[in-house]
Amino acid sequence: MASFTKKRVSYFYHPEEGHFYYGPGHPMKPHRMKLAHHLVVNYDLYRKMDIFEPHIASAEEIKNFHAPDYIDFLQRISPNNQKDLAPELQKFNLGELTDCPVFDGIFDFCQIYSGGTLDAVSRLNHGQCDIAINWAGGLHHAKKSEGSGFCYVNDIVLAFYVTDRVMTVSFHKYGDFFPGTGDIKDIGTKNGKYYAVNFPLLSGMDDASYESVFKPVIQKVMETFAPSAVVLQCGADSLTGDRLGCFNVTTRGHGECVRFVKSFGLPLLVLGGGGYTIRNVLRAWAYETSILLDEEVSNNIPYNDYFEFYAPNFKLHLEPDLELENANSREYLEECKNKIFENLRALTGAPSIQMSRAPPTYMLREEDEDAADPDLRTDNDGKRHHEAEFYQDDKDQQGNDDANAGNSSIAAICLHQDREADNAAPDVIPMDVD
């Protein structure tokens, strides 16, 4: 493992990303990104990293993975015209009868979080940082031609579409739970065989149990696949007390997984994802930002405009639910781990594949900067200074230049509880699995 030296961290945040609203009663609250950023700032973590406002991803950039007709539709659809476009809504799995409603600014929202992920990748590709964070990203359920699981554009696929050497690893709730797939036998097909690792977990998963399987599996993946970079999706729906989840993992346990992946010293893209008890999502992502920065933070939430949001104890760390039974026996977890090790042994070699050329950088465009309105131009390569302005919505407080990319390989690790790893390997682009 790499030495524990401090890493150069780039953090991406757009001031508009928390201004979107899925609708009343919907568990996905983009407002959480605003509040998470607020907590990061109030812990003074923003002083330890470079903060960037990402570019707005273009439709053409997003079409690098997604079907053009789907993206064109996302640009046209709105709450005002959705009734007139009912047949297409059904085709693309959108609308009030699905978990992907149509809301004001739907495509703007997709462009913002996708732009953050693309810019994060650009800085990593150019060696301008060691770790890049985009908590607004990680919306990994979206398929090539349809929305799914609260997600419309799959920014994770956009992050590594220039490489076809990807291994996906997922630890998730399995069984009667969305999307109902991700069996340990799902290891990929054809050229993707053995490039998908699924660890199916049962209800009540706690810190000790999670660590007992996460660390050895990730260690074995690193030894077998030898990735040159890692995408870590940190869905917070695995936390205890989540509105939709049924795990019993604390912020410390969740953060320990992030710390372990960071310890390998590989270029690391860190993204958000699920998480539906908002105050706990904020706790997790602020804490994990501190881990990525090698900074200690107090367990006492710093006083701020949203202080009452963290009642009743006003602490950063969550305690486990002592009454929640852990259905994952030691024998079951050991059996699953051994099966995964067996599958990884079958991956006898992971040859380097010459990759496509990397996409143009979005952070180093001299022509664009020269033409820009000087009143709107940001300094330091797009870096933003902190602004103490935060949006509050009471409704939501419930509950490269064209350089060669070279030989690269990606380990995409999903630390969540609601999604399986998709088929991925040489000659296939992952995440478009029914």
Image (tube, rainbow, N blue to C red):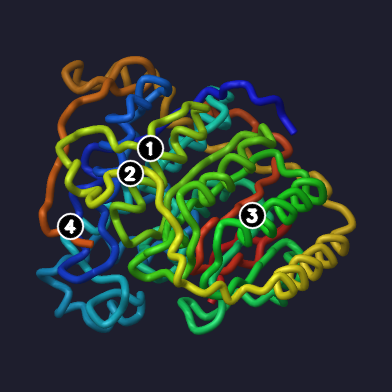
What amino acid is at disc 3? Glu
Labels 4 & 1 near each other (Cβ < 8 A): no
Q: Residue at x 20, y 16 (%)?
A: 374
Q: Quick check: 346 left or right of 106?
A: right
Labels 1 & 2 near each other (Cβ < 8 A): yes
What amino acid is at disc 2? Lys
Could you tell me residue 239's position as x and y percent? Answer: 44, 59
Q: Which residue is mark 3?
A: 211
**From the viewer's perspective, is residue 353 above or below residue 167?**
above
State which tag comes first along the sequence, 4 or 1.
1
Q: Quick check: 301 left or right of 170?
A: left
Q: Residue furthest right?
A: 348
Q: Which residue is mark 2?
A: 315
Labels 4 & 3 near each other (Cβ < 8 A): no
Q: Which residue is mark 1?
A: 299
Query: Who is closer to the viewer here, 29 or 205?
Result: 205
Distance of mark 1 from mark 2, alpha carbons? 5 Å
Distance of mark 1 from mark 3, alpha carbons? 22 Å
**From the viewer's perspective, is residue 17 above or below residue 186?**
above
State which tag comes first along the sequence, 1 or 3.
3
